[in-house]
Image: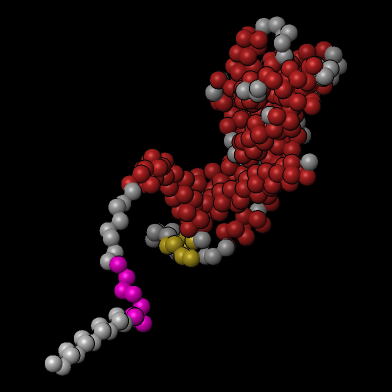
Amino acid sequence: MHPSPTAPAPAPPRERTGPTPPDAPRPRAVDWRRWTPLGFLLPFGTLFVLTFLAPICYAVHQSLFKLHRSGLGLTPPTTAFAGLANYTEALADRAFTSSVLRVLLIGLVQVPLMLGLALLLALLLDARRTPGKRFFRLAFFLPYAIPGVIGGLMWSFLYQPDVSPVTRALSDLGLHVDFTSAGMLPWSVGNMLTWGWTGYNTIVIHSALKALPGEYAEAAELDGCTGWRLAWHIKIPMVRPALVMTTVFSIIGTAQLYNEPVVMRAVAPALSGDWTPIMAAQNEVAANNYQAAAARSVLLALVIFVLSFGFMRFVNKRGAAL
């Protein structure tokens, strides 16, 4: 009997040399929570675009055109692209450039004086032994609560040489001062701004002082740092952000000076109709020259931008150096 042949051994499985086919993609669920913050920001973003960005873009667009009137003016004027012609005319206008320099001069003196006074008052309110804190807090803030036009009328009465009790008292002392003269007008307007805004800045700085942790002051007092040394070495450095914010707001507000000079024109013949940049732009609007007014407004915005961000950059560099 012949032996049965042995069955052949099964061949080993072949190894795959090609790339492994990827798995089928799975549908990824949308995480709507990532879009929730955008939903909260949408109302603000819409208002910001409509009330801030859109007017700026429209003003820049208008400033690049000019009105051309032909003949005797019987036909409606036409608008033509003029490039930077409105800007060159504004920069060549001596009255407009003088108004910008005048406002810068007022801010250079008035803003540091006002903020220094506001800081001093805030430190006095924050001191432990200052009597009548509630009364003085309200008294400092009261001028800010008065509308700017009403405050301008009040100061116009105090400045007018014929009826001013201040001028009369100075005359009795042998000092003849005319607060409405051309040389005194910048300081008269600066005094009005200081009176109206010192209390507001005082409240802002005082709120920052009240938010400081009490442990720092207690530790400094244990080391013998009290009184003005405590204010200079501890409190003032710690309210630096509030001081920077009030300075930037004051720069912007001074550059936008309008109400006080317009009200004072009734008693100050030396105050011209283009005494400030906004007044100069308003004159162009009154003359139906909206393109020139837009160019002056854009130039004023650039000045404010350079001053504000230049100051913030200077403060940040100095803070980093310290």
Residue found at the very far top of the displayed protein = 131
Residue 93 against residue 238 in the figure, above or below: below
- The residue sitting at 68% across, 29% down in the picture is 239
| Magenta residue check for 186 | no
Q: Can you give x and y, in whole percent of width and height, for residue 285 in the image? A: 50, 46
Residue found at the very far front of the displayed protein = 1
- The residue sitting at 68% across, 26% down in the picture is 194
**Number of marks drawn:** 0
The foreground one among 233 and 205 is 233
- In the displayed structure image, the side of residue 218 where residue 309 appears, left or right: left
Q: Can you give x and y, in whole percent of width and height, for residue 36 in the image? A: 36, 43
Q: Can you give x and y, in whole percent of width and height, for residue 295 in the image? A: 55, 54
- The residue sitting at 65% across, 31% down in the picture is 242
Residue 250 against residue 227 in the figure, above or below: below
Answer yes or no: is residue 297 visible: yes
Q: State whether the magenta stretch is mostly helix, strand or loop.
A: loop
Q: Picture quarter containing residue 21?
A: bottom left
Q: Give the range drawn in magenta.
A: 15-23
